[in-house]
Amino acid sequence: MLLDELAGTAAATNAAPAAKGAEGERDNTFRSYPLYIGGKDVEGDDWVYTVSGRSLLEDVFTSVSLKRALEKDPDSEAAGHPYVVGRCAIAGDAAIDQASEAAAAAAPVWAAVPLDRRMTLGTRFREELLRREDEFLEMLVAEAHPVKLARWELSCLLQIYSEESLGWYRQQMHTEFQHGGRRLIVRRQPDGVVGFNPPQNAPLPSAALAVLALMAGNAVVVRAPRSIALSTMWLLRDVVAPLLEELGAPAGTLNAVCGNPKQTLDRWITSPLIDDIFYIGGSEQGLRFEQACVANGKKPILELAGNDGIVVWSDADVKKTAEAITEAFYGSGQICMVPNYVLAHPDVAEALIAEVKEQVKTVRPGYPEDEDVLLSPVRRSERFFALLEQAVGNGGQIITGGRRTELDGTPSETGVFLEPTVVRVDGMEGARSYDMVRQETFFPLIPIIVAEPGSDEELLERFLHFVNSNEYGLRNSLWTGSDEVIDTFVARVVNGGLLKVNDSHIGFLPYLPSHGGTGMTGGAFGEANYPILKTSHVQGVSIARDVSPREAVFGS
């Protein structure tokens, strides 16, 4: 999870100061969001408060005291402290069900709106993101995302909703042909009501994928993560909801509730009103959730863990490859789509490791609003050190990093940051005996596996097998100057939802998927995830005139 501790929450009741947003003005930094159900703001059972990401780095004692005070007394003056940046209402069972009912009532009306009109939602959404860029960044920084990474998250949405991508979605949603005097249509129809479950590490950009489900013609219920709800509610209530009103969408097309994950998901699974559940989370829990969905007649759309690999061939551009590898440390590795391991040709390994070690020096900790900061605090680091201990025990070598640090990068046993850490693993044969190679780690940690010497033909086969046998399947990258190696990888890599060649591993592009994958990343139905397609289904239509059914069946 990306800084859910720093974002912080504390329960309180409806008794709280007047606030900005749906409830009027308090000041320019505090926001308050009730539940949003059926086109209306609805009171919740309680409140959760968000403390700024900077506060726990700047004054941990005050921040913790504020949260405890708000937990004990909703009338506490703690709610007025500048560290407290907002609050969101909490949904109980009745509100969760009310949101599902509102969506079910709106779904058929919204589905009947012409596709071209629904597609304009994507264009308008992109325009609003650009217009409100500063506000977007402010929301993410408040939840402890480094501002540099917040811009990267915005770039993701700008590509997903680019005119190029929107045009491609439109083509996939409705295509027509003329054949034998008939008008033939291959189209996608909305599934109905989609429940969205964003993760705690990136709730705002993940919740923004719900706009694609809306464009498909679905009604949507989004659960804002209880521990870090503010940015999600801002996006849905202040950005998306007004756009739907502008398009004349019926009340209930979009609903946003902040709730306990198990409570909400359990009700969605058993509700006859929910058709799809878009689940973003860990692999083990997500795969169990998939089974529960299928057993209850729901379509599971899974966006789970990643264990991405970067393959480096002997003729790779070492400097640029190292730039891509250091993306593993962005956000302290607490991003599912960053690289998790490197597989290096032995002829380039030494130069590559030296260059990565040098470039790691540019990845530093700091306050989230500082422009040069790329590291984020890591709340639970016990597993990080267990992974290192296992690696060293197996013969791995720590090239750089491996310690806790303070805000300024000074090594410290009590620091809340972890140094970017590179571990050398010699040999592919036993590489997957290292947990840091076999599993997603979610730390600023990357193993570089140096392959055993061999002929290029043999190594290419072994590299392909290693990539394709990964239990996870989000993204893969290849770095090489050889057209033959590129063509072989493109033709034969079946693992993953995205393959990048000589490019940023985490960068986004129009047309191509931003999410989705195979194996433990996407479950039994895993593939590249285009949410507008995933939350709809293919339907064929034939419109004929002056056709004899008998002739159609028995004629030539």
Image (cartoon, grey):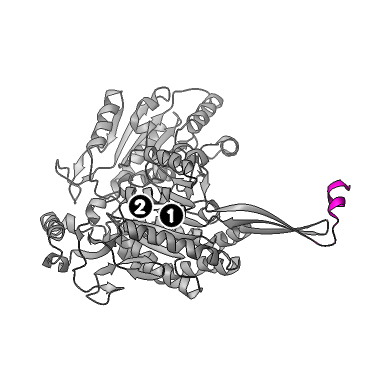
The answer to whether 501 appears left or right of 134 in the picture is right
Q: Is residue 313 above or below residue 457?
A: below
Mark 1 belongs to which amino acid? Gly
Q: Mark 1 or 2 closer to N-term?
A: 1
Image: magenta residue range: 544-556
Of 381 and 411, the residue lying toward us: 381
Query: Which residue is found at the position 35% from the left and 53% from the top?
Result: 202
Mark 1 → mark 2, Cα distance in angstroms: 9 Å
Marks 1 & 2, CB-CB < 8 Å contact: yes
Query: Which residue is found at the position 56% from the left and 64% from the top?
Result: 111
Residue 272, how many percent across, how many down?
A: 47, 52
Of 132 and 537, the residue lying toward us: 537
Q: Secondary structure at mark 1?
A: strand
Note whether residue 306 is visible.
no
Of 485 and 520, the residue lying toward us: 520
Mark 2 belongs to which amino acid? Thr
Q: Is residue 133 above or below residue 471?
A: below
So how many labels did they put on this image?
A: 2
Of 376 and 221, the residue lying toward us: 221
Residue extending furthest bottom? Answer: 25
The answer to whether 545 appears left or right of 518 in the picture is right
> Where is mark 1, residue-wise?
195
Q: Is residue 18 above or below residue 169?
A: below
> Where is mark 2, residue-wise?
264
- Density class for disc 2 (Cα within 10 Å; few <14, some 14-19, many ≥20) is many
Residue 341, how many percent across, how many down?
A: 39, 36
Give residue 32's quadrant in the image. bottom left
Residue 480, how many percent across, how many down?
A: 51, 39
Give residue 16's quadrant in the image. bottom left
